[in-house]
Image (cartoon, rainbow, N blue to C red):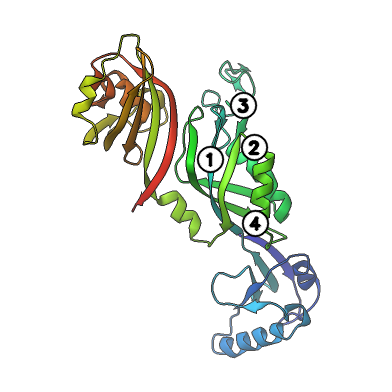
Amino acid sequence: MVHIHHFTFQEPLPRLSGEWLSALESYSFQTYTIGLRTSKIEGKKPLLAALRQAVAETPFFADKQFVLQHPDVEIVFDELIHQVVIHIFPVILVGRYTKLQRTIAQTRHFCFECKGSGKKNGNVCPQCKGEKVLTKESVQELITPFFQKEFTCNEVLFHGAGREDVDVRMLGSGRPFALTLENPIVRTIDVEKLRTHINRALKGKVELVELKIGHPNDVANVTRAYHTKRYRALVESPEKINLNPLNAFLEQKMDVVQLTPTRVEKRRVMKERPHWIILESFKRISDHIIEVELHASAGCYIKEFISGDNGRSKPSLKDWLRVRCGCKELDVLEIVDAEM
């Protein structure tokens, strides 16, 4: 979103000083562009060129660069409505995070039962007990206050490359994410110093593995990319587990068809989704618990692949093992290459 300021003027075109320039002086920015909206079609080009030249010669703009694409600030002189319209473009940051606890959501986790109202049928929601959210902490809520303070911005929007469940740790080199910083007063900071400060403050909870200033296109690049993922899971069964059947599937790329899982059917379209999965390794922890490492296509439901989800995931690890089983613990080990 672009933050917009409007300043009215009475002359045919405004003086290159006054309220609109004073407003800009509170912002730290390096690049800008100039636009013009006028009814004078034939005279627009020379008038726009003159405006750009006049603004460039203003002392305030002496250390700033005029650009045609992706500016920090756009100044539009609108002769039709007699306003100077200033667009403050957001700062984009991109990085990767790891999540080290099994009680932290990726983003604020509103209660699905009461839709974040805290009430159900006029009473306190039994699911969230009136708290409106299902988790006390999220990656989004933990990290965004640091950026809001450093960049002095109105709001920080979090965009993840997919998400892991609340009870799943995100390990390895982390999950890609992007931040949109709305209406930032400050645009240039020591990002690496901020990353170190955040990691120290959130030690044991969340770590930012990478962090850098991004490009406006990076938000779409992060959210639209489809990544394969590697997982480690502890699998538990009430029956003694025989590992021998798994040898037939080891390191084989197996097709899996998954009907919308039971646990998300209220908020997902009911349909079959084709995936693939590779059993990379397995080992025994006890008679009833084994550890497996899996590599799966984007969007594959790993917990359901393990349990079979009452026949909604075909085949499943349950089918391969020939015993009832479920996922006791799950970690994302790696977000692999993007599937474009």
**Residue 127: x and y, percent?**
56, 18
Instruction: State which tag comes first along the sequence, 2 or 3.
Output: 3
Instruction: State which tag comes first along the sequence, 4 or 3.
Output: 3
Instruction: State which tag comes first along the sequence, 1 or 2.
Output: 1
Q: Residue tagged by mark 2? A: 203
Cα separation, mark 4 vs mark 3, equals 33 Å
**Residue 96: x and y, percent?**
52, 48
Q: Nearer the viewer, mark 4 or mark 2?
A: 2
As drawn, 29 above or below 275: below
Give me the disc on residue 98: 1
**Residue 29: x and y, percent?**
69, 68
User: Which amino acid is tagged 4?
Assistant: Val
Horizontal side, residue 266 vs residue 278: left or right: right
| Quadrant of the image containing the N terminus | bottom right
User: Which amino acid is tagged 3?
Assistant: Lys
Badge 1 marks a residue whose secondary structure is strand
User: Which amino acid is tagged 1?
Assistant: Thr
Instruction: State which tag comes first along the sequence, 1 or 3.
Output: 1
Q: Residue tagged by mark 4? A: 191
Instruction: State which tag comes first along the sequence, 4 or 2.
Output: 4
